[in-house]
Image (cartoon, grey):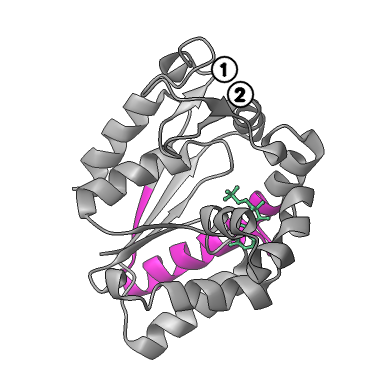
Amino acid sequence: MKVLFFGPNGSGKGTQGAIVKEKLKIPHIETGVIFRDNISRGTNLGKEAKGYIDRGELVPDSITIPMILDRIKQKDCVNGWLLDGFPRNLTQAQELDKALKKEGIKLDIVIEIMLERQIAKNRIMGRRLCVNDNNHPNNIFIDAIKPDGNRCRVCGGELITRADDQDEKAIDKRHNIYYDAKTGTMAAINYFKELSVKNKTPRIIELDGKPGVKEVSEDLLKKLL
Ligand code: AMP
């Protein structure tokens, strides 16, 4: 199963993505995680990407597109993949579509979590990361996943914030890119929605991101299966 997962920063996309990964037994490929991993390991890719990420800008397509097209060719992706954080603009969507067509690969599902911009922003600023597991959800502004004091609510691990989560200007920049229906992420989503209307594939799954994590997961699972 080949799946794309869209949602603005702060919509709970990472959390819901982990559920899809479990259900469909496919690797969860998160562009942001790949970049951050490269930054912490001090690789050339990490050094190139860091400035853009710290400013809340997209890493250039010339770096990101080959990185992802290469990643989905790896062995663990033979039965499918869940792309999260890619494509993030119209060019990336077109290039992905082109590459898949060239390889004869069919995109099965596109999932979109829909959420108002202001709510998404509050959620980002409240987000806390568990040092033990990136998929342990903690957010000081969401009752259902409030940390246990200042420790991870799942495993009791230490919690940290991402520098770019606390930078309002960078958040606004990221959202400007996401909600841009001309060339940004909304344009990428619409690109696949138009393909879906034209070709009856991929299947589009729209989720309302406003309710709590549990409700969104239930809606997701119901629509996925
Ligand atoms: P995320 O963890 O998805 O919020 O991504 C963190 C940062 O990584 C973004 O703000 C961008 O700077 C960069 N990034 C992630 N995905 C992409 C992408 N598809 N294209 C370009 N830059 C990206």
Asked if the magenta segment contains residue 204, the reply would be: yes
Q: Earlier in the sequence, mark 1 or mark 2?
A: 2
Q: Position of residue 36 (x, y in %)?
A: 59, 53
| Residue 150 visible to an observer of this rendering | yes
Few, some or many C-alpha atoms within 10 Å of disc 2 (few <14, some 14-19, many ≥20)? some
Q: Are marks 1 and 2 in contact (CB under 8 Å)?
A: yes
**SS at mark 2 in the image:** loop
Q: Position of residue 153 (x, y in %)?
A: 41, 19
Residue at 62%, 64% in the rendered image:
89
Q: In the picture provided, is 10 more to the left or to the right than 60?
A: left
What residue is shown with label 2? Answer: 126
Q: Position of residue 225 (x, y in %)?
A: 18, 48
**SS at mark 1 in the image:** loop
**Which residue occupies the foreground of this view, 186 or 44?**
44
Assign ligand 1 to one image quadrant.
bottom right
**Which residue occupies the foreground of this view, 45 or 67?**
45
- The magenta segment is 177-205
